[in-house]
Amino acid sequence: MRFFSDNAAAVHPAVFKAMAEADRLDTAYDGDAWSNRLDATFSALFEREVAVLWVTTGTAANCLALAGLVPPFGGVLCHREAHIQVDEAGAPEFFTGGAKLLLVDGPGAKLTVDALEDARSRIRPDVHQVQADALSITNATEYGLTYSAAETAALGAWAKSHGLGFHLDGARFGNAVASTGASVADLTWRAGVDALSFGFVKNGGLSAEALVLFDPGLADGIRRLRKRSGHLLSKGRYLAAQLLAMVEDDVWLANARAANAAARRLAEAAGQRLVYPVEANEVFLKVSAAEAAALRAQGFDFYDWGVGEARLVTSWNQDMAAVETLARAIEGL
Amino acid sequence: MRFFSDNAAAVHPAVFKAMAEADRLDTAYDGDAWSNRLDATFSALFEREVAVLWVTTGTAANCLALAGLVPPFGGVLCHREAHIQVDEAGAPEFFTGGAKLLLVDGPGAKLTVDALEDARSRIRPDVHQVQADALSITNATEYGLTYSAAETAALGAWAKSHGLGFHLDGARFGNAVASTGASVADLTWRAGVDALSFGFVKNGGLSAEALVLFDPGLADGIRRLRKRSGHLLSKGRYLAAQLLAMVEDDVWLANARAANAAARRLAEAAGQRLVYPVEANEVFLKVSAAEAAALRAQGFDFYDWGVGEARLVTSWNQDMAAVETLARAIEGL
Amino acid sequence: MRFFSDNAAAVHPAVFKAMAEADRLDTAYDGDAWSNRLDATFSALFEREVAVLWVTTGTAANCLALAGLVPPFGGVLCHREAHIQVDEAGAPEFFTGGAKLLLVDGPGAKLTVDALEDARSRIRPDVHQVQADALSITNATEYGLTYSAAETAALGAWAKSHGLGFHLDGARFGNAVASTGASVADLTWRAGVDALSFGFVKNGGLSAEALVLFDPGLADGIRRLRKRSGHLLSKGRYLAAQLLAMVEDDVWLANARAANAAARRLAEAAGQRLVYPVEANEVFLKVSAAEAAALRAQGFDFYDWGVGEARLVTSWNQDMAAVETLARAIEGL
Amino acid sequence: MRFFSDNAAAVHPAVFKAMAEADRLDTAYDGDAWSNRLDATFSALFEREVAVLWVTTGTAANCLALAGLVPPFGGVLCHREAHIQVDEAGAPEFFTGGAKLLLVDGPGAKLTVDALEDARSRIRPDVHQVQADALSITNATEYGLTYSAAETAALGAWAKSHGLGFHLDGARFGNAVASTGASVADLTWRAGVDALSFGFVKNGGLSAEALVLFDPGLADGIRRLRKRSGHLLSKGRYLAAQLLAMVEDDVWLANARAANAAARRLAEAAGQRLVYPVEANEVFLKVSAAEAAALRAQGFDFYDWGVGEARLVTSWNQDMAAVETLARAIEGL
């Protein structure tokens, strides 16, 4: 019974079905009928005109966006534990041409205006120090916390007041939407977000993520860099079809709700053991080494997270019987 | 009836079947059972130990290889009409950190030792000029010509004598193998090739290409750069499964033979109109504007190629009746 | 008697004198009194407001300018034999983050609107090909030809009509000004030039070149990249003082005239042997190997330039007696 | 009376004299007689064969070294307050092609094996995290502390045990040598240092720093990158002459001793106000805003350093009467 991550789960049947329907000759790259439907489909979802590019990984989505928002000599304010800083092998530096991540702290990998302002104000506005050109946040965060629409809007207003671009890493954006109940518009462009990495692969997709651009001026350069970075697949219709399948019937939202529900059940069981409130599909538990071993002996797999902590992640298709068994095992520790 | 390109054709059923079989939870990235079988499967095909990485595009395969073979201040000898120079949006410069493509001429986008030696000898061996660090060729070439095993070996020997790495862009490598009848070993490592971009997408695949490394010292750095460039998909098993399906039952070879056969039929019809000998699945015809229009009026789609020429490309699943119809139409011009 | 190059000659006394006068404590980097006078001094010379940055090499000036004019995924139209392509070790690729030089031909390393338009029109306006974002010319060219104000203006108008930035490599700009008799304004911003690498080192300077920006929007980013590329010297006043010494008393123009005059004398002697008209301080001669040996036997040093040609370069302080001796030696061949 | 920094002081007369002696025609770039003497002169000083390149800034020296020691996808362990992290505008990222600085803490910007081992051990050895490839320290540190030969050797042994390159930023290396009394060999290659940025500009030089390479395998690539980054001046003899003047008569050591002595006098006066021990030519004082204002009212200029601290830097030619006056003013606070 695996609670390692949501990024290796099986694929939702609707995704495979859509790919099979796309299995006929069409124009290469993103000139096909499926790719051509993306902008309209996502524009309807986001209640305004957006430009959407398919890419195959969240890393590509994040770093294409950042390369659009900062010059090579620029800087990106982000959390010290942000995925772009910790787990993308220097991809932001690669895509941007050597921009610098400017690291800010905060509990649960969540940023506040106060922490950002403190960091920004310490940068001397001269040519010797890398200046901040953009802000990047993750919703839900790497520790499963969410930003509400109001929190996002506060960050967006602050970013705009300093002329910063605003990127949202939404590897688990669906979980954040399901958890907060906010509209996708309120969590993004209405809050000042310029570019969203809208993750589908962790949420039942196969190999397609959406890079959603609210600033239309970004699209041309990013389309060029998508090709230049080897991310323009020739049979792009199979990626577009995945995104359409996830969005057109709200599969993404149903999947996120299912994963969140599984996590909530574990959170109830964990009680005082919780390191962070459970606001998405990740559960961080305080457990001793002996307790972790006891859970593993019962067949549960998960990551140790530093000393005395464990990380459990639930997926869109998590077996609820297994979740219940695990919940009781946690309660019984 | 489309003869635009082989890069937008439908996918071979074995590929879809293999992806469906991979549709269950496994380890993320390339830690899964399918990815773990790649090295052995390709090593058997190549008659020696190789390291294989899946990637989603030929551009990524080519440029990861080049980044492994040349330093950022280095140079790559290639044909002036090579795909890496003409159609990859500067991806070689991006992946290598700004290395320079050093352009060499030759009919049909094919290189010879003489032409290479002439180019290399013009480079002053000082710090003011970019030095050649690698050679990259394409087999079959961008104009559908092939390099025989002996021709490749001559280039490889020359490259080694000057300390150059040797990359082979095999976007249509299957077609070259089918056409020359040479073994994949003789066309690559036995001829001195260090890294092969083994293309499957143009040959019936969906989204998986293989980067085959004969120099094991290249693998560690290239694996890091694959992640860093956003090309390490979390559900990598669906890519590995595609490659295994193409290789394990020689689907790649059967598909290449079919495409080549279709092109040969067109070549017979074209006769004196051929710009180049047809050695793979591309046919370049001399046609007047009126003749091109006449063919299009009969329902055939293809690219104009400069003034007075047309490019026809056949695919693994090209409808042979359509090919026959087109052949007769060409004969009837 | 050396005619190798103008880039190793001694330094004009006024330059040393100015450096000695600057030898007292002042603010570091470019905050000193000398650096602060640059903009006004050059603005007077150019008859409009300009921003001027000192740098230590022409390569740095050229490539900082290009990095300001093109995005990393962009392209620079230039001559196939331009210094930035041939002799800067890939510096344009390094500073721009991997932009591509798009090479155009023309006699004497000189470009025309027709040749440029032909090259530009062959670029497909899609994401697969690197687009042209800027034009870079060299005046005087690498073969000692000059662009008149009218020729420059024609190129500038063409560049602007296609939305291209316009960079002028003026390593020997002084020689071009002296030769054409045009004003520096007519040869630059009035002709549409956005950024000028104004060379002084080949013309009697020590270690200071001027990057002159006519588009004020370029200055902020380029100032940052100057620091980032290690080109912001802490004792910048010694560089600024060099530039002021060269400009404030028209030393640059007198020096250029002297070098041009020496070259003209050689050109008269060369007569039919000239490969190109001599319009600056470089003389390309047709000479047999025996003739070249004969000149060297008389104590003259110079570069062979391909087979059957020799390059002679005159400097600001070329000994006119030696020039006369060489002229007669050439006449006597 | 200025105590802002040592980087804007006047130039030692021996440096100007040497430049004047170099003021005659010679070979361009680094082919001249002065540049050719560098390796031997520094080899004698360092008691072993070394390769030496002149460059114009410490940033260039540091970042050329780092680019030689780490791949573009690599990482450099350094202090969170290291100059390369804080004050070089992202130059390390630019020169290395996007490598990451991996930040470590420690009082006074000084690193220990324990702190480094703690940081290194937190990096997962997988492709998702940037690995450490090199260590960079500064001696004397940004806060004027020194590493003894034994401390450096401990760091070097640790670096080698993990396969890391070892770079020493010696912007104030002379001050460290003067202070510790160790030999330059013991503070560098005998302690495992691969590359040293040997600073002269802060110590009485004009525009020449020395990049000293103990690993001869580094020289070829770094020489190429020096050109590629625009740092190969054509009249290099004027830089080489500066370095020779500083080294051949131990001017560098005398200058460093003078600056250190001035700082020691201030340290005695400061007593309990010292934030760090004064081991080089920088003095950090605890002073209230009123006290700082009082000192300024007496004509002393210096930097505020955060709240309640001031930084005083002494130069090679600091007027000792002014130092004495300042010392008494501090005592009188």
Image (spheres, coloured by chain):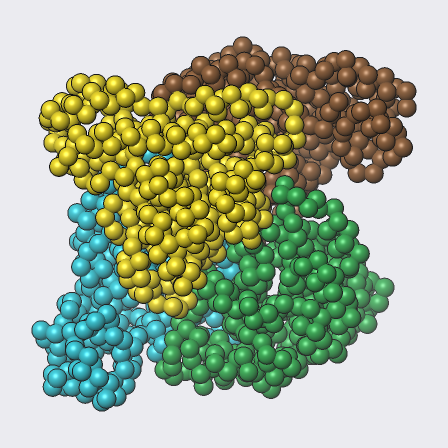
Chain colours: A green, B cyan, C yellow, D brown
B226 up-or-down from B130: above or below: below
Quadrant into which the N terminus of chain C falls:
top left
- Does A267 appear above or below B47? below
**Quarter occupied by the C terminus of chain C:** top left
With respect to residue A265, does A145 lie above or below? above
Residue B26 or residue C282, whichever sits in front? C282
Q: Position of residue C268 (x, y in %)?
A: 18, 32
- Residue A210 percent location from the top left of the image: 56, 72
Residue A100: in sight, yes or no? yes
Q: Where is residue B271 in the image (x, y as percent from the top left)?
A: 10, 75
Give B36 or A144, whichever is nearer the viewer: A144
Task: Residue at 44% x, 14% y: name it.
Answer: D21
Q: Is residue B52 visible?
A: no
- The residue drawn where x is 85% and y is 35% is D308
Quadrant of residue A236 within the rendered picture: bottom left
Q: Position of residue B213 (x, y in %)?
A: 37, 53
Total numbered badges shown on the rendered structure:
0
* Quadrant in the rendering for residue C203: top left
What residue is drawn where x is 9% and y is 73%?
A: B272
Q: Which residue lies furthest to the left in this view?
A: B272
In the orientation shown, which residue stands out farthest toward the bottom?
B298
Question: Which residue is at a point 66% across and 18% down the rendered structure image?
Answer: D316
Q: Nearer the viewer, residue B137 or C285?
A: C285
Q: Nearer the viewer, residue B234 or C176?
A: C176
